[in-house]
Image (cartoon, coloured by chain):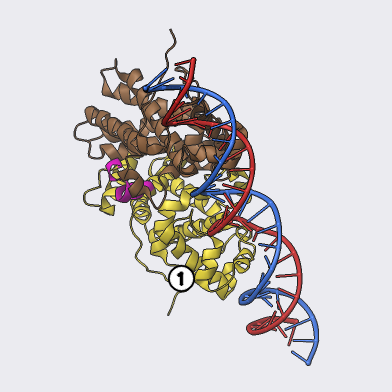
Chain colours: A brown, B yellow, C red, D blue
Amino acid sequence: MEIQLQIKMNEKLFLRNPEHSELGKKIILHSIQLIHKNGFESFTFKKLAEDIGSTEAGIYRYFENKHRLLIYIAAWYWSWLEYRVAINTNNIKDPAIKLKKIIKLLATVVEDDVKTSYVNENILHQIIIAEGTKAYLTKHVSEDNKDQLFKPYKDLCAKIGEIILDCNPKYKYPKSLASTIIEIAHFQNFFMYNLPSLTDFGKDKDELKIVAFLEDLVFSSIRKG
Amino acid sequence: MEIQLQIKMNEKLFLRNPEHSELGKKIILHSIQLIHKNGFESFTFKKLAEDIGSTEAGIYRYFENKHRLLIYIAAWYWSWLEYRVAINTNNIKDPAIKLKKIIKLLATVVEDDVKTSYVNENILHQIIIAEGTKAYLTKHVSEDNKDQLFKPYKDLCAKIGEIILDCNPKYKYPKSLASTIIEIAHFQNFFMYNLPSLTDFGKDKDELKIVAFLEDLVFSSIRKG
DNA sequence: TTTTAAATGATAGTATTACTATCTTATTAA
DNA sequence: TTAATAAGATAGTAATACTATCATTTAAAA
């Protein structure tokens, strides 16, 4: 039996649903590759079209602009991560063990377990580390937020916040700690590889050390008092 | 007596030193204003030139491109912050109190104490919150890093790391905790105003709550064990 | 199986962006 | 006073970020 993961995406994320056609899937697959290769700034729909063997106008039928495409990719990533969190924690009772599992999912490289044919999840993880925050660090965050474009990110954050509260119902900052875990898992990874002096992991470049750091940070805060 | 703060900047940050001319100072002042107003993505040298009453070519004599200008502004900000950290902590002996002071400097709005005629420090603080990470989240971080473009950021981080070690010489992640404090101070501020459900401060929008959260996070980690 | 609609391909065109080049005129410093 | 140096003015180019149109292919409905 082959498991095919299909993530339901908010309609406002695209003009035409890329999951419903071959061209659409190619757009997602190749944009992830191109952004990974050259970075989001030098990524253009022209280059993407050439890469796919389609035309610029063709891409514009799916996404308003490259920023919207980034938001789509990020939303897909967070939905996929929440799904992985769900399947990896649903048989665990102890919230602390749940939280540890989540930290590991956030901070370590993905093993390509569930295949979604048109997305390379490992590369996706890497581009979200480097480019993910650009999805919302804009002047139009609030409007985009009203259109629910960041819902998957916020849902995941809310879920982590709840688990933090399960660990300690008196902890005062569950949501802020949740968003902190998410962002720091990515930032410490980026720093470790690119600006290593900002971390304590520069020498061995071991993602498990980021996990250890985050666990230490999180559990000493939650359990204290 | 009027105190004039002059920050020595790395020569590689610019083509011509903007501090050495009126036009240069206008470039810094107006670019901060424009980036604050419309965001970094829609910021162009053409618009900047029009705003100043100069020409595009004139700006290009000072900075290679707008990304370099952002790096310059960020570097200036981190240098200035390290200076403020120095004057605000040099008479304090207790490293824990030092650290609290630093968290406050990072997370709260600046009171315009020391004037640097051509920089509005309050607006600067806000644009670094929203745009600062874009200075290094690029495909050419490593080359830029070799040119020491991020030195002020790294110096500040190292300094905070040392103070953390002063608090507890056995703490295992001083540098990672330092970069975490810096980034989270800014991210929680951005979230609080723009994606409030990612924080516990959405209702009152009180920066002092970010300070409290960070203090709780930092000191429970450092002091534990 | 034909008709019709929808998606794609091909091509063209525009305004803006991101520059580079050159020449002239101020400003400043030797 | 002359000689650099910086700034202003103008022009030009390649690439980016789109929009529009029309023909063709593919897929769904009659």
Horizontal side of A151 relative to D21 (left or right) equals left
Q: Is residue A37 in view? A: no
Identified at 41% across, 25% down, the residue is: A105
How many discs mark residues in the rendered view? 1
Image quadrant in which the N terminus of chain A is located: top left
Residue nearest the observer in this picture, A82 or B2: A82
SS type, badge 1? loop
Compared to B135, does B48 lie above or below? below
Compared to A161, does D26 lie above or below? above
> Most extreme residue toward the left, as rendered?
A170
**A72 magenta-colored:** no
Give x and y (percent) for residue B148.
60, 51
- Start-end of magenta stretch: B187-198
**B196 magenta-colored:** yes
Image quadrant in which the C terminus of chain A is located: top left
Residue nearest the observer in this picture, A117 or B135: A117
Residue beneath disc 1: B116
Horizontal side of A39 relative to A133 (left or right) equals right
Give x and y (percent) for residue B188.
34, 46
Identified at 55% across, 52% down, the residue is: B151
